Amino acid sequence: ATDAIEVDAAGLALAPGFIDAHTHDDRIVLDKPDMLPKISQGVTSVVVGNCGISLAPVTFESDPPAPMNLLGGREAYQFPRFAAYANALRQSAPAVNVAALIGHSALRLAAVRDVGRKANSAELAEMCALADAAMNEGATGFSTGLFYPTNAAADEEEVSAIAARFARQGGIYATHMRDEFDRVLDSIDETVRTANAANIPVVVSHHKCAGPANWGRTFETLPRLEAAAAQHRVNLDVYPYAAGSTNLRMDLVTSDYPIRISWSKPHPEMTGRELSSIAAEWGCDLHEAARRLDPAGAIYFQMDEADVRRVMSSRLAMIGSDGLPHDIHPHPRLWGTFPRVIGHYARDQKLFPVETAIHKMTGLTARVFNLADRGLLKPGAFADLVLFDPATIIDKATYDVPQALSLGIARVYVNGRLAFTPEQGVIARAGRLIGGRNNVHGE
Ligand code: ZN
Ligand code: CU
């Protein structure tokens, strides 16, 4: 067929634009709307607001506590309502589409006087009202980070009461579970009970079995998730690496696995180095070194490669980078996730066909998050597209050099506009707020 614009795509593959199912891009879409780390991978949509952490609807008088500080300091939090965030997004015009979850930690810090305890009934009512408003104003769903101190005091009852409000308006629920270590099965059971009680589709975030004592236990967790999925809508997201990354936390500091520092406020000169070598240089133990570095971020080599492969191969699994865009020395997942799944795991390692890899980052994700007319190549769907070279596509970001453009992405289109080529960089910023009521009221 011919038309006004002709593209020579000889030797290239055309796919729906990739959807990053799990991000913390809430602020970067406003501050650096070029979104180079993502669009350069072929990503055309991101789901923000994961792990209970979202920029709206909360403000702070002093710097926010961990893990909210992963998105920035007090000045980053300017959105007492989700509508204000949606507005800022319209102004910033990011290069990729954004579907937004509302974080339970954000709701708790906005409404609960003491986040160290369960919400009382007045506080719960306030969180439910904020949830209703956010869905009305274009949010896609709800997230928790029950592993984190700002969220951990919430029990199943509190979580399901709020999740039910999101469910009423067609929302989705994603959870960074209470425990991904020894009690991972209990956490899966809790997740399924909570989602069932709230009658809401659920996504287990960055599924893993963390810590050497739990390596191999995806043989237990995946069948448990599959069994739940037979009764209820259950999915999971996963990044293609055996290391995780979050704040530097005392309870994660151990000599069981290597730990690398991704940022440190008091000791920025230690960024990118291994905690054990810092401790050796300072002549102290790991915990003392961690205390001196805090507040800080870290990369934890806490997973087994075979588990990562099994999780990725699950038919329930979507690809989500979980990249942390404000880290000084970020985990390479921020720049490399999508080309790595296609080039390394599907093509080179033959973990699954390339078509399966694409489905896990497009059609499946659009269906799970209810992103209408995205994630598919079909007449009438939004033209979020990526042209890539299946023979050369590969990630280049590593733990040593984490900020590197991937190879093999030829052209990326967002909402019908050519948005990125490797020669020209980011050309257009055509992203918009998607998901939730935007499906009905969008253009
Ligand atoms: Zn998380
Ligand atoms: Cu996350």
Image (cartoon, helix red, strand yellow):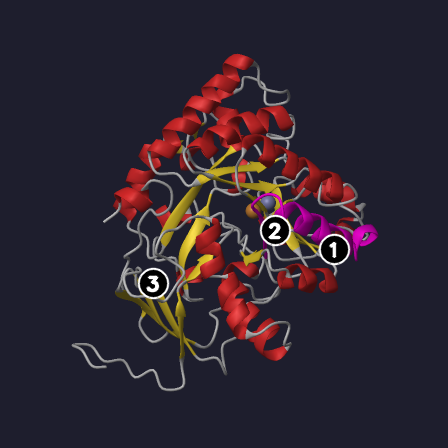
Between 18 and 340, the residue placed more toward the observer is 18
Type of amino acid under label 3: Asp
Q: Position of residue 68 (x, y in %)?
A: 53, 36
CB of mark 1 within 8 Å of CB of mark 3? no
Between 212 and 383, the residue placed more toward the observer is 383
Question: Ligand 1, what quadrant?
Answer: top right
| Number of the label disc, if any, that sits on residue 384 | 3
| Number of the label disc, if any, that sits on residue 218 | 1
Pointer 2 residue Cβ closer than 8 Å to ligand 1: yes
Between 88 and 199, the residue placed more toward the observer is 199
Sequence-earlier tag: 1 or 2:
2
Q: Is residue 23 visible?
A: yes
Alpha carbon distance from label 2 to label 3: 25 Å
**Does dot 2 land on a helix, a strand or a loop?**
loop
Q: Position of residue 395 (x, y in %)?
A: 53, 71
| Number of the label disc, if any, that sits on residue 158 | none
Q: Is residue 146 above or below residue 284?
A: above
Sequence-earlier tag: 2 or 3:
2
Alpha carbon distance from label 1 to label 2: 13 Å
Q: Place residue 178 in its image quadrant.
A: top right
- Neighbor class of circle 2 (other Cα within 10 Å; few <14, some 14-19, many 20+) is many
Residue range corresponding to the magenta coloring = 212-238
Q: Is residue 64 visible?
A: no
Sequence-earlier tag: 1 or 3:
1
| Number of the label disc, if any, that sits on residue 206 | 2
